[in-house]
Amino acid sequence: MSIDTGRDLFSENLNVSRETLGRFDLWNALLRKWSKRINLVAPATLDAFWTRHALDSAQLARLMPDRATRWIDLGSGAGFPGIAIALMRMENHPAHVTLVESNAKKAAFLRACIDETGAPADVLCARSESLPPKPYDVITARALAPLPKLLGLSEAFAGPSTVRLFLKGAEVQKEIEEARKAWVLKYESVPSLTDKTATILKIEEAYRA
């Protein structure tokens, strides 16, 4: 799939404005520029920015109501999905996204993205488990850890109405079974727009058994 086709597919699936699309263009350009110096994503996936990364991440923005304004993204890396969510919601349903990234170089990249695109976000250069407890409306994570560990990492940021949105691959059912040995879960499995073997876990309740 060419980059142009991926960009069109992104726009068609999410019905984004020209301005939003332009901000994603800026992010894409920064990703390519910085990737020459630091490892942000697998080099082979740079040309798949629009589908492999942008669409996969941005699809989360539509899964939460407008009142969900305080988001935290754990292990943000190059901004997937945190930057994508901030950009998707900044025009009509603004939300502030806190990006947690322990790698200083990646954290610097995230700050550059925020400055360039105007994304309503901030960066905490720290490990998730070192941060003080604070509830958010939504917790997100992509390719960070297996579900049992993710539930533990996200526990400090969950309140009574917090929803967790975790992007998961083909092993999701095995991860759920393993998590249920220690956690009681209320969740919905949402099919991914980008991969028929992938799933978005929308967890509305999670507490230790």
Image: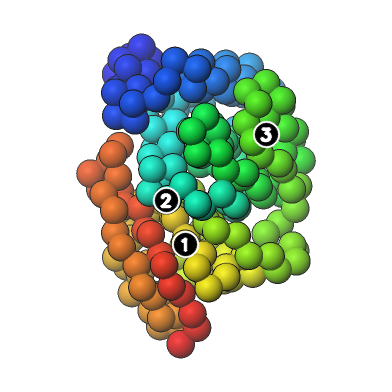
Which percent across, then down, holds residue 117?
Answer: 63, 23
Considering every residue shown, the one lying at the far bottom of the view is: 209
Which percent across, then down, holds residue 69?
Answer: 56, 49
Residue on which the image places disc 1 = 163
Residue on which the image places disc 3 = 110
How crowded pointer 2 is (Cα within 10 Å; few <14, some 14-19, many 20+) is rated as some
Q: Amino acid at mark 2?
A: Met
Which percent across, then down, holds residue 147?
Answer: 45, 65
Question: Does residue 84 appear in the picture of this structure?
Answer: no
Q: Secondary structure at mark 3?
A: helix
Q: Is residue 201 above or below residue 48?
A: below
The answer to whether mark 1 and mark 2 are in CB contact below 8 A is yes
Q: Secondary structure at mark 1?
A: strand
Residue at horizontal 41%, vertical 67%?
Answer: 204
Q: How many marks?
A: 3
C-alpha separation, residue under disc 3 versus residue under disc 2: 23 Å
C-alpha separation, residue under disc 1 versus residue under disc 2: 9 Å
| First in sequence: mark 3 vs mark 2 | 2
| First in sequence: mark 3 vs mark 1 | 3
54 displayed left or right of 33:
left
Residue on which the image places disc 2 = 64
Residue at horizontal 43%, vertical 37%?
Answer: 58
C-alpha separation, residue under disc 3 versus residue under disc 1: 24 Å
Q: Amino acid at mark 3?
A: Leu
Nearest to the observer: residue 204 or residue 161: 161
Which percent across, then down, holds residue 125?
Answer: 76, 47
